[in-house]
Amino acid sequence: MGVPQVVIVGRPNVGKSSVFNWLVGLRLAIVDATAGVTRDRLTHLIDIDERFVELVDTGGMGIKDTDDLTEHIEEQIQTAIDSADVILFVVDTREGLLPLDEDVAKRLRYLTKPVVVVANKTDHEGLDPQADEFYRLGRKVLRVSTKQNLGKPDLLEAITERLPDASQDGEPGEEPVMKVAIVGRRNTGKSTLVNTLVEAERMIVSEVPGTTRDSVDVHFELDGHTFIAIDTPGFRRAKSVSTDVDFYSTHRAQRSIRRADVVLLFFDAGQRLSKVDKQLCAYIAEEYKPCIFVVNKWDLMVDAMPTERWVTYLRDTFRTMWHVPIAFVTGQTGKNVKALLNHGQMLFKQSRSRIRTAKLNKLVRAAIEHNPPPLFRNRRPKVYYATQVAGQPPTIVMFCNNPRALSKQYRRYLLGVFRDRLEFGEVPIKLYLRKRESSDDRNEVDGKLEY
């Protein structure tokens, strides 16, 4: 289970970014009276009652963006809602309940996730009756004021109570079902592979590009293991999305990637890589999903091109994805498909791996001794200790004296060390840098934490 996500939503200009900054304790999100300043999701790791969560700020729901980015903003909001464990629905006590608040409430009404209405700008007790008006939305209402610093303990307690159980990784001895999303450009043989896996004509297979219009879950077994294959519509370039069907197919395929445990990114061995392939790869990386590059229809190219040329071609194109394994298969005949799924299981296992804190700190100490971080403003950055806080993806928090002092290049070096020396060498790793609080006197010594 990954780090739980707490997502802040609401109509424009109710103080969502103020609530975000208030809970984080830093001025990260831009706070402005102009509606629509926040467009992309903004994420920050916070510690609530000794449990790490990702706090996510989103753009205003229902806004008509002046730069014609409404569709992009709505997509970012929906992505955040889909991945949320707890939702904070922020409203404005001073302005009261508006029709757009009710529209947001309708959008959240049928979610099974916990939703808390946060009545911001309740700056004094005299405004409590106005805040109580939001009980009409059918949710618990918490009165807060970021400006007056009121209500934060109650809000943090409400979040903690609604977080999923930290031990929700399945019962002991229970084998989790691996969900495999099969994605790629149109007509690369994705549905053919699904038919081969289930040994039946479950998907409609056609030479006409774009036959699959929706994401479909197919359950099957292999060697006593249960899988769910998610067959997805073929991706198209944004400017080629000309119909509502294409638009929703793309969104469903992206949602399938977010749902998946492992993603198989399909390429046609007889075609060159395209912009769509690069966009897909970027989206998979953005979602931190374990991935295998699958070169399909290899039977048509095996005599014309050595595998090494395709490997070099993929590595040169996707330079930041050098850890992703590559498979050559023929989906129609099933050649190498079993080995592909076995490798997918290995990635699934890697993504769920947990590393003891002592082992992790010993490795961090050795990496820093071998290659110390560069000086920052004439001072050497100091790393105190590190700990893994979640799996799927493996998430490591490193405490130091100044997170900004460790450059992106040095962080990439540390991630490379983790992949080389730990159990998750082929899957994405999240690395967070946190400043050690003055009350935290833990230090790593000889691979152990001392107090």
Image: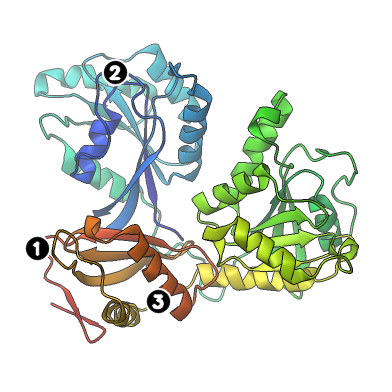
Whichever of labels 2 and 3 marks the residue nearer the N terminus, that label is: 2
Number of the front mark, 2 or 3: 2
Whichever of labels 1 and 2 marks the residue nearer the N terminus, that label is: 2
**Is residue 178 visible in the rendered structure shown here?**
no
Disc 1: which residue: 439
The answer to which quarter of the image holds residue 328 is bottom right
The answer to which quarter of the image holds residue 317 is bottom right
Task: Classify mark 1: residues with Cα within 10 Å, few (<14), some (14-19) or many (20+).
Answer: few
Q: Is residue 347 above or below residue 9?
A: below
Label 2 sits on a secondary structure element that is: loop
- Residue at horizontal 81%, vertical 51%? 191
Task: Classify mark 2: residues with Cα within 10 Å, few (<14), some (14-19) or many (20+).
Answer: few
Mark 3 and mark 1 residues within 8 Å of each other at the beta carbon = no
The circle drawn on residue 251 is: none
The circle drawn on residue 34 is: 2
Residue closer to the observer: 428 or 94: 428
Q: Is residue 174 above or below residue 217?
A: below
Q: Amino acid at mark 2?
A: Thr
Disc 3: which residue: 355
Q: Amino acid at mark 1?
A: Ser
| Quarter the C terminus occupies | bottom left
Number of the front mark, 1 or 2: 2
Please indicate whether residue 225 sits to the left or right of residue 372 in the image.
right
Residue closer to the observer: 425 or 113: 425
Q: Mark 1 to mark 2: distance in Å?
A: 38 Å
**Tag count in the figure?**
3
Q: Mark 3 to mark 1: distance in Å?
A: 25 Å
Please indicate whether residue 335 sits to the left or right of residue 427 in the image.
right
Label 1 sits on a secondary structure element that is: loop
